[in-house]
Amino acid sequence: MNSEHDKPIKIRDPIYGFIELDSQEKEIINNKYFQRLRRIKQLSLTEMVYPGACHTRFEHSLGVMQMASDMFDNLVKHNRNKEILKLDQYSIKRTKKILRIAALLHDIGHSPFSHAGENTMELLPEGHLDLVTGTEKYDHEHYSKAAIKFLFRDIIEDHPLVENYPISVDEVLLLLGDKTVRLRGRGNLMILKELISGQFDADRADYLLRDSLHLGVNYGIYDKSRLISCVTLGESETGSFVLAIEEGGLNIAESLVIARYQMFSQVYFHKVRRIFDYHVSNTLSEILKYLGLKNGIFLPPTSKENMIKYFEFDDWSIQGLLKDGKGGKHGDHILCRTPYKKIAEWRGDMTESIENEIKSYENKYSGKNYFLDKNVSTKWYKLDKDIIISSNETEKYYPLSMKSQLIKAIGQPNVTRFYVAREDL
């Protein structure tokens, strides 16, 4: 008989109603490193523009787990998809468990102030350009994978619940795109990886709705139930299978992309929100220097010891030092809400004319405090990673951009902005 401690729990959520967790998932969220996500806001200092933006990575992580579960449940309702994934009733439950844990822990490695803190992360070792993110620095995904390896292995692999469905850390990491993992016969997991990180993954499906709710905007709203019901598998001309949207759901695919486009253009790349990210990055670096971290950057995610030290930092600890005046001049801009002012903006690709204008501004404000936010692309949709629409008639697939004139028409706007400290205007 299960003890009271082993009973599942339900957590009320504004997006899904209730999110149910089994005893293993409950132990994960009660772990002190996961509880740290309660102290990291989802959108950094977006509250400086939208005061309601005070939600955290904690609730988002629970939401991604629920969304991934709902998508998976619909996917395996269809016998054809179960056959493609080679899933029987036992392996359905086991695979869903791996998926839920991967979704739950996908953001565990976020720094204080979420993405705004990633500029204070170490450079990757020489010759190790990250092919997934296209960056030369460690990012929160590297820290998340390291946390799972070093700090969550016991809960994942040794919890009593896994006696029924044994899983490994490597299987969880495979779903999170860890290129170092090699697992034979786990091709079905590679397909499901798109549920965690893809064009219509559970991550963005959750944050669009959650961010819209807390910010009080409608930009990111789409039909959640319709999206979940349309998730399927499509077959390419080479015979491989990919996560796709049913052909009848083409409109919901468009809606999701438009929602993402609007959230990026109106919220995530709002001119004031962007400059506060700059102030946060510099403030965080100043505080890390004060605390003795070399060059004002976090220790790399290369050992258990480094990860334990890294997890000592969260929004609360940094804000305490910020309030005590340890954040330097950029910290003062945050405390007094006196961000640099945008004095010029250019839209579109960089041209020689724009470059000359930028140089003139740089010359004018030489020796003063300014910031060039250069070539900011919303990256709302990458045509090289198109949403796949599965044709019911041919059982093949085609990219969304092939059929949708709307997606082709929106374009991929770039924005460059020039900011100057108010005292230097």
Image (cartoon, rainbow, N blue to C red):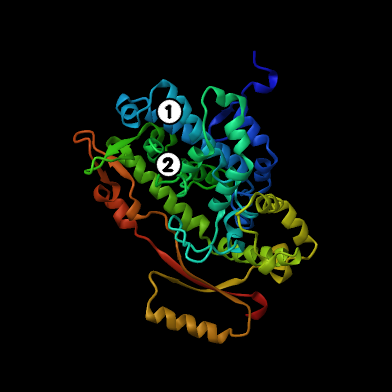
Answer with left or right where residue 43 lies relative to residue 318: left
Q: Is residue 336 visible?
A: no
Tag 1: Cα neighbours inside 10 Å, few (<14), some, or many (≥20)? some
Please count the marks in the image.
2
Q: Nearer the viewer, mark 1 or mark 2?
A: 2
Q: Residues within 10 Å of mark 2 (few under 14, many from 20)?
A: many
- Residue 267's label in the rendered image is none
Q: Position of residue 110 (x, y in %)?
A: 60, 51
Amino acid type of disc 1?
A: Asp
Outermost residue to the right:
324
The residue lying furthest to the left in this view is 394
Above-or-below relation of 390 to 295: above
Q: Which sits in the foreground, 24 or 354?
A: 24
Question: Where in the figure is residue 32, as x and y percent of width and height?
Answer: 70, 41
Q: What residue lies at 39% left-to-right and 34% top-to-bottom?
A: 226
Q: Secondary structure at mark 2?
A: helix
Quadrant location, the N terminus:
top right
Between residue 355 and residue 307, name the one nearer to us: 307
Dot 2 amino acid type: Lys
Looking at the picture, does residue 423 appear above or below residue 231? Answer: below
Q: Alpha-carbon distance for marks 1 and 2?
A: 15 Å
Q: Which residue is disc 1 drawn over?
A: 73
Q: Which circle's residue, 1 or 2, is located before the other in the chain?
A: 1
Query: Residue 314's spot in the image, x, y percent?
Result: 69, 52
Picture quadrant where residue 234 is located? top left
The answer to whether one can see residue 4 in this image is yes
Q: Which residue is mark 2?
A: 193
Q: Position of residue 354 (x, y in %)?
A: 42, 78
Q: Residue at x 59, y 66 (%)?
A: 275
Element type where label 1 sits in the image: helix
